Image (cartoon, rainbow, N blue to C red):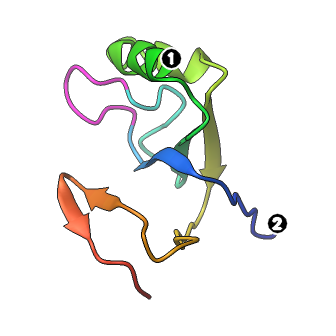
Amino acid sequence: EGWRAIEDDLLVFWVCNTSHAAHNMYTCPAAGMDDGLFHVLVVRASCSRWRLLTMLLSLGSGGHVDCDECEVVDCAAYTLEPLTDTSHSVLDGELLEDGP
């Protein structure tokens, strides 16, 4: 299959290849240890703070994936390209510079 593009303002772009990000964070319930996929969790900027808080509080149970505002995209490869020069990207709390 070809590439799928998501062009939008995002609050969350979280890529997982395991079901848990920590012992108490069931980040991607559908992920299998040997499925060979990345599971990209996307939350768009149109999500309210209240709904985002609700999702974050349900990370322990995996319930966040049932929220309408959380989209999970399964893929074999992905790329993230900021739409503007003023994007704010972090990796494990570290600010990333935009660029190729």
Q: Nearer the viewer, mark 2 or mark 1?
A: 1
Residue 99 position in % (x across, y down): 41, 85
In the depicted structure, whether residue 22 falls above or below residue 49: below
Residue 24 in magenta stretch: yes
Residue type at mark 1? Arg
Residue type at mark 2? Glu
| SS class, disc 2 | loop
> Is tag 2's residue or tag 1's residue first in the polypeptide sequence?
2
> In the picture, residue 59 is in which quadrant?
top left
Using the rendered image of the protein, determine whether residue 85 is visible from the camera's viewpoint: yes
Residue drawn 52% across and 71% down? 82
Residue assigned mark 1: 51
**Is residue 26 rendered to the left or right of residue 8?**
left
Using the rendered image of the protein, determine whether residue 35 is visible from the camera's viewpoint: no
Asked whether 76 or 80 is in front, the reply is 80
Q: Which mark is residue 30?
A: none
> In the picture, residue 71 is in which quadrant?
top right
Asked whether 34 or 51 is in front, the reply is 51
Magenta-colored span: 19-26
> In the picture, residue 20 is in which quadrant?
top left
Q: Residues within 10 Å of mark 2 (few under 14, many from 20)?
A: few
Residue drawn 35% across and 61% down? 89
Q: Which mark is residue 1?
A: 2
